[in-house]
Image (tube, rainbow, N blue to C red):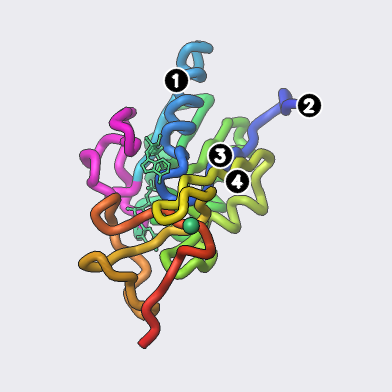
Amino acid sequence: MHAITNGGWIEVITGSMFSGKTEELLRRLRRAEIAGQEVVAFTPAIDDRYGETTIGSHDGRSWDATPIDPETDLEAVFAACNGEEVVAFDEANFFSNSLVDVCERLAADGRRVIVSGTDQTFRGEPFDPLPHMVAVAEYVEKFRAICAVCGEPATRNQRLVDGEPAHVDDPTILVGAAESYEARCRHCHTLRED
Ligand SMILES: Nc1ncnc2c1ncn2[C@@H]1O[C@H](COP(=O)(O)OP(=O)(O)O)[C@@H](O)[C@H]1O
Ligand SMILES: Cc1cn([C@H]2C[C@H](O)[C@@H](COP(=O)(O)O)O2)c(=O)[nH]c1=O
Ligand SMILES: [Zn+2]
């Protein structure tokens, strides 16, 4: 593969929950730091599972990050950037489609932009802004977890409420991890529709 050397670009890390997106993001940030590059990372203020100023993976690794209010604060990204070569966004599924424009401006400014987030809602529908980010990115990697029911590769996010499949009309946003979600394949993924 011919890697880009003459300017900024966008990388997307996506896939189901528990598929290793955050581990991969942290791996890329560690390697950038080893290469002597300045890194700044942002996380939505809504996701406080691992502490407000931390990007955390399901296996316990973490990285310091600046919390951003996903509703109102995206312009604050530019104020928080101080010429870093690498700009990362975790949990991009909590941001609006305005994140696409922010990432395009950062890439146009010569930055390496890395965006991580799940690409499907618990209903199995596209979860904006990830599908849009995929369309404008130079590099995309989609990861699969292991289906919690059958052990096949999992691309879907099963939401569970009191151990039962969530209802199709439930709100899209529900911050959580293993207490509310499982990784599942398309055959084992279910929704309550009654
Ligand atoms: N069903 C599963 N499939 C794969 N990994 C899982 C599963 N459940 C828990 N894990 C753990 O989650 C880790 C991935 O965590 P993380 O990078 O935070 O995922 P993501 O950011 O995609 O939600 C795996 O290395 C593994 O230790
Ligand atoms: C499918 C789905 C997920 N979420 C939330 C649940 C978690 O807080 C994050 C995903 O985290 P991960 O790092 O990918 O494990 O998104 C949601 O609010 N709504 C959904 O439909
Ligand atoms: Zn399955």
For the N terminus, the image quarter is top right
In the image, 147 versus 12, the foreground residue is 147
Eye-nearest disc, 4 or 1 = 1
Image mark for residue 129: none
Q: Residue at x 72, y 28 (%)?
A: 4
Inspect the image, locate mark 2, and give the three-letter code of the amino acid beneath it.
Answer: His
Q: Residues within 10 Å of mark 4 (few under 14, many from 20)?
A: some
x and y percentages locating residue 40 in the rendered image: 41, 29
Inspect the image, locate mark 1, and give the three-letter code of the amino acid beneath it.
Answer: Arg
x and y percentages locating residue 135 in the rendered image: 66, 53
Q: Which residue is mark 1?
A: 30
Q: Which residue is mark 2?
A: 2
Eye-nearest disc, 3 or 1 = 1
Inspect the image, locate mark 3, and give the three-letter code of the amino acid beneath it.
Answer: Leu
Q: Residue at x 28, y 56 (%)?
A: 175
Rounded to the nearest angstrom, the CA distance separating label 4 from label 3 is 5 Å
Q: Which residue is mark 4?
A: 104
**Which secondary structure, mark 1?**
helix
Picture quadrant of residue 90: top left
